[in-house]
Amino acid sequence: MHAVGFDFKNMDALIKAAFDGGVRGVNTAPGFALIGAYTDPSGARVAFVQRKGQAATVSAGLRSETTYRAQVVRFTDHLARVALYSYGEDGGLLTQFLAMVDDPIAYEQHDLAPGGGFSIIQALQVGALAMEVQVFEDEAAFQASDAARVGSMLMEAKSMVSPSLMGLQAASLTIEEAGPTLLMGAVVDSVEVRRNELAETNFQYVKASSIVDITIAVPMDQPVEPGNVIHGTFYATVNAGTWDNNAG
């Protein structure tokens, strides 16, 4: 929440402010009491998913300006395996990772096992929220740092690993233990300071280059500028534009 400026004193205050500000959603999805989201004019988003008879889950999101053709396998209420493909004739696979989907109604739920089914999204918005990150002046500064060394391996400034996806593939994690965390390095292309109008808090809306181009939200207490390398853990978030296009 901090990455996109939702700095409220507690979760109840955030939820009240979001619903007062206007939540788009649906309450007719089978098995769900509510699926919805508040999208701030800044692009910061807070999403709600509630099963009938259960408490709502609340998560942060981002309206991203970076889109890809994607195969999405949503295997829980809000977690999906996302495979990104290039546009054009080759349409090659670029990368894949686990991400939080803030609009689960856009994708049927499937089994993660081979042959379990999937959804194709032609313009999936792909974003990341900075969690625990470091900022380096440039790629040379990153390569000279301890952060670039993981055991005997030397990490590239542009790198992306989905630990939970690796854990699921190795059968060392259960689906319940999986999450949308990325270990990522990205080079900053541009930075725009945006104001979260709901919380009256600024954050940085960053377009960056990693294994793929990606839009990142970074809190103001870690200032970045073009050419910097941001490295660390991020929260991967994607959506199909549902809350941008459809009234709830």
Image (tube, grey):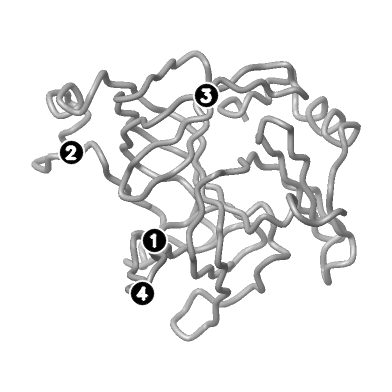
Q: Residue at x 82, y 63 (%)?
A: 32
Q: Amino acid at mark 4?
A: Glu
* Dot label at residue 96: 1
Mark toward the start of the polypeptide (3 vs 1):
1
- For the residue pair 12 and 199, the one nearer the viewer reads as 199
Mark toward the start of the polypeptide (2 vs 3):
2
Q: Which structural element holds mark 3?
A: strand
Q: Quarter of the image containing the N terminus?
A: top right
Q: Are there few (<14), some (14-19), or many (20+) residues within 10 Å of tag 1?
A: some
Q: Which structural element holds mark 4?
A: loop
Taking the view exactly as shown, the residue that stands out farthest to the front is 89
Quarter location, residue 207: top left
**Distance from label 2 to label 3 (Cα)?**
31 Å
x, y percent for residue 224: 40, 19
x, y percent for residue 7: 68, 20
Q: Is residue 5 left or right of residue 57?
A: left
Q: Amino acid at mark 3?
A: Glu
Mark toward the start of the polypeptide (1 vs 2):
1
Q: Is residue 18 left or right of residue 230?
A: right
Q: Which residue is mark 2?
A: 150
